Amino acid sequence: MPPIDWILLTAVSFVAALVQGATGFGFAVVALPFYLLILGSLSAVQVTIIVTLALTISVALREWRNAPKALLGRLVGGTLIGFPAGIFAYRHADLETAKLAVGLLIVGFAVWLLLTRGDRPARESPATHPIADIAVGIISGAMATSLGMPGPVVLIYLSALGAGKETMRGTLLALFVFSYTGALALQGWQVGIDGATWTTAAILIPACLAGAATGHAVSKFLDQRTFRFVVLAILVATGLYMTWTTVL
């Protein structure tokens, strides 16, 4: 791979990890589209899974206690159900079509949230519905194993419930540890992960850890309104980018 590609991959990894460190979310949705462009193959999904797992473990140790246990348990249960569907999609479906659908979905929901939920006060213990929790987990699990992106649907759901900053971060990070561990195991078992993919991920992890540390420091200065704006901006920008790169 040309040196410029390594420079671009490192820069993307640092910025995406900074976003994740600051918000508890965002690495995959920021990094994956660029990984796909630079690497030019589906191995980008596997690199994303490996790197995000390492990154998430390093951050989740500080945040997982903020996740509501009942909600997290139902999300994990749904994720287990969704895993097989995601692997099937990865192996058999048209990835470009999936990217387009996900991009449009993210943009649509993010815009809706921006227009309708901006003044609702945040709640660190939002009321949820068990069936809805499981359904969101199923979609998240399918997206974890197919695209390495379990976060958007959960983030949209928590935003719709008016969850507070700490609840969002804790729930997302705790779920990510489980989701990416399962996704990596299933990718290795059902698809296979070659040596070049492991090497690429290993080279990028230091930049990711540096970005995450920087983002964690930044997070202390984000109030609830700013946090919400950053999260929605990430969703809109990523959804538009995924749609644009797929159509063009």
Image: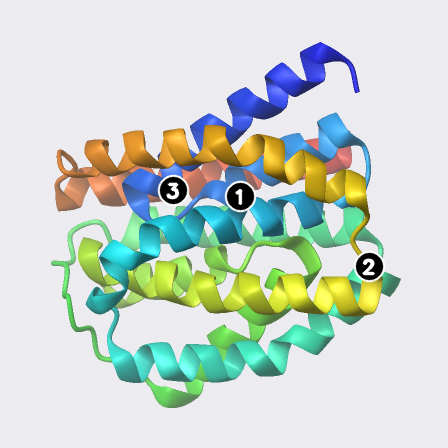
Marks 3,2: beta carbons within 8 A: no
SS at badge 2 = loop
Query: Which label number is shown at residue 29?
Result: 1
- Which image quarter: residue 22? top left
Tell me the number on the disc at residue 192: 2
Q: Nearer the viewer, mark 3 or mark 2?
A: 2
Name the residue rendered at 14%, 59% in the picture.
Answer: 122
Q: Position of residue 191 (x, y in %)?
A: 83, 62
Residue at which label 3 appears: 20
Task: Give the amino acid type for the residue marked by disc 2 in the picture.
Answer: Gly
Looking at the image, residue 95 sits to the left or right of residue 245; the answer is right
Name the residue: 26% across, 69% down. 67
Q: Residue 215, position in %: x, y?
A: 30, 34
Q: Is residue 53 above or below residue 69?
A: above
Residue type beneath disc 3 = Gln
Horizontal side of 96 relative to 101 (left or right) equals right
| Number of other residues with Cα within 10 Å of mark 3, as a class: few under 14, some 14 to 19, many 20 or more | many
Question: Which part of the image, by quadrant, shows the C terminus?
Answer: top right
